[in-house]
Amino acid sequence: MPILDCRGLTRAWGALRAVDDVDLAVEAGETCAVIGPNGAGKSTLFAMIAGNLKKTAGRVLLDGEDVSALPAHRIAARGVARTFQITAVFPGLPAVENVRLGLQAHDPLRRRPIGGGAALARGAEEALHWLRRVGLADRAATPAGELAHGDQRLLEVAMALAQRPRLLMLDEPTQGMSVEETRRTVDLLGRLIAEEGVTVLLVEHDMEVVFALAPRVVVLHRGRKIADGPAAEVRADAGVQAAYLGGLD
Amino acid sequence: MTPAAPRAVLAAIAVLAALGFVLPGYAVTLLTEAIILALFALSLDLLVGHARLVSFGHAGPWGFGAYVAAGLLLVLQLPLPVAALGAALATALVAVPVGWLCVRTTGVAFAMLSLAFAQLGYAVVFKWSAVTGGSDGLPGVPRGGGPLGLDWLATREGFHVLAALALAGAYLIARGFTVSPLGRVAAAVRENEARAQALGYDPRRTRLAVFVLSYGLAGLAGGLYAGFARYVSPELFFWTVSGHVLVMVILGGAGTLVGPMIGAMALFFLEHQLSGLTESWGLALGIVFILVVIFAPRGLMGWIEDALRRGRRASRADP
């Protein structure tokens, strides 16, 4: 059974169908990238899967269970972690606390209104471990909002991984990074994905990033899925090239 | 993160309590009122500072708590501490449905909704004369010791100590909440709601928890005030009360818990001193407020922290 199974997902704004009848299944352990020119509906698709946007039609199944009607926090609690296209951290809180909050979401004491020191202590230690994994251990005490842009994006990845997700959704993880930063981030992501064995759904603009990370590529164009298959095949597909390279139309 | 050590805060409150046995009677009465206002401001800081939900209706729980305590004291003749705790619980209970509606919003909409509920309280006590005494209010609220031999608490000194105990307890609860797992989530929701939700936290329920706690503590403050003034009236619900306590929080430094308590006491005594000197004391107070906002944007507490830091650095540089 696929971890994620979207069936006929559709989102319409008036006459505009931003996402139009998209089927998408992601198997456990797979890394799948969704690409497409601006306005192809990638972000809309992402938002519907994560529960941030109502679906006009269609269903989302997680591990075979219908989660179409659940709000975002319920879907997150079922093991879907995500990063945002526009960096989303807790700017006023220390980096380590950002990650610790990701861990706390699974702690049985997470809703304690008073006390709960045990949960906080074990969380803080594990959070440092995750910061080390993304190379931010020395910035643990720095407020997240004061980190460099690239570091904030890595922090988001650490937060998402700390949730121990069944499905990790990365929304343009290298957005706004320099070439050098992008290369390092791709290396790091590739290593983390392999080591954690996590299932990944990736939205990305940068083709280098896509082909470095994702063996499977899905192409959206004007809300419709026009290709889905091994990266090399999709890259060679004439229709994809037309849609993508002519993507400024 | 609350910077001040809880022990230092509790020690300061103990000193305030002890002053009740030293100062002349009139000064003790003033200090008692200041302590109750500090408790009121503390409760608002949970919303404004910790959750960044700027309530413009905190007169609501304050007035509600006061009327509940007045009822318990007048009708059931309960002992004072029981009436105050009853007021806190009743207010927290009412805060569940009120908060459920209010925390669906944030920002200006939240401020207006909270104000609307406070005004609703005002209208109800004003119109429902048979129960609330209408515009006359309920005079002659007794300060009962009850059957438990708590008569001492009804005296000037006893009531003063009771208020200080309530402040200490409320501070411990508020501080304990802000550093607890749920309190940390509330901070996360304040910092970035979408991100907190993506981690699996329900922003509304988290805000509701802060709301209920804040209202409960404000109800406690209002309940104590009913016993203090021995009189409740619709004025307790009036929107100027909400504005007043908001100024206390901002003046003292929102989000620090300690700052708003200091701000409340500072503002109260300043008003008291100035009103003895000049009729246009409101003008002077306005100027003070403007100066604080310009020169100490993090409030008195921010200013105190900076001064302490400078002091520490100076003592390190000069062995």
Image: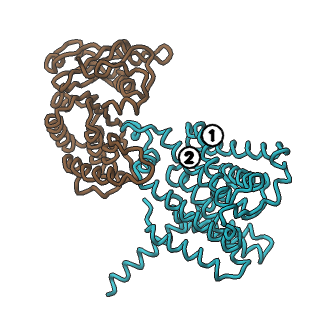
Q: Nearer the viewer, residue B204 or A210?
A: B204
Q: Amino acid at mark 1?
A: Val
Residue B287 in sight from this viewpoint: no
Q: Position of residue A173 (x, y in %)?
A: 27, 36
Residue at x 24% of width, y 21% of height: A26
Q: Position of residue B279 (x, y in %)?
A: 80, 72
Q: Position of residue B189 (x, y in %)?
A: 45, 44
Q: Nearer the viewer, residue B304 or B172?
A: B172
Left or right position of B165 against A153: right
Residue at x 40% of width, y 15% of height: A10
Circle 2 sits in a helix, a strand or a loop, which is it? helix
Q: Are marks 1 and 2 on the same chain?
A: yes
* A138 is higher (above) or lower (below) than A22: below
Residue at x 32% of width, y 87% of height: B319
Q: Position of residue A73 (x, y in %)?
A: 40, 33
Name the residue beneath numbered marker 1: B98
Residue B25 in sight from this viewpoint: yes
The answer to whether marks 1 and 2 mark residues whose Cβ atoms lie closer than 8 Å is yes
Shown in brown, the chain is A
Image hue for chain B: cyan
Checking the image for residue A8, the label placed there is: none
Other residues around mark 2 within 10 Å, as few (<14) / some (14–19) / many (≥20): many
Checking the image for residue B211, the label placed there is: 2
**Badge 1: chain ID:** B
**Badge 2: chain ID:** B
Q: Amino acid at mark 2?
A: Phe
Other residues around mark 1 within 10 Å, as few (<14) / some (14–19) / many (≥20): some
* A10 is higher (above) or lower (below) than A200: above
* The C terminus of chain A - image quarter: top left
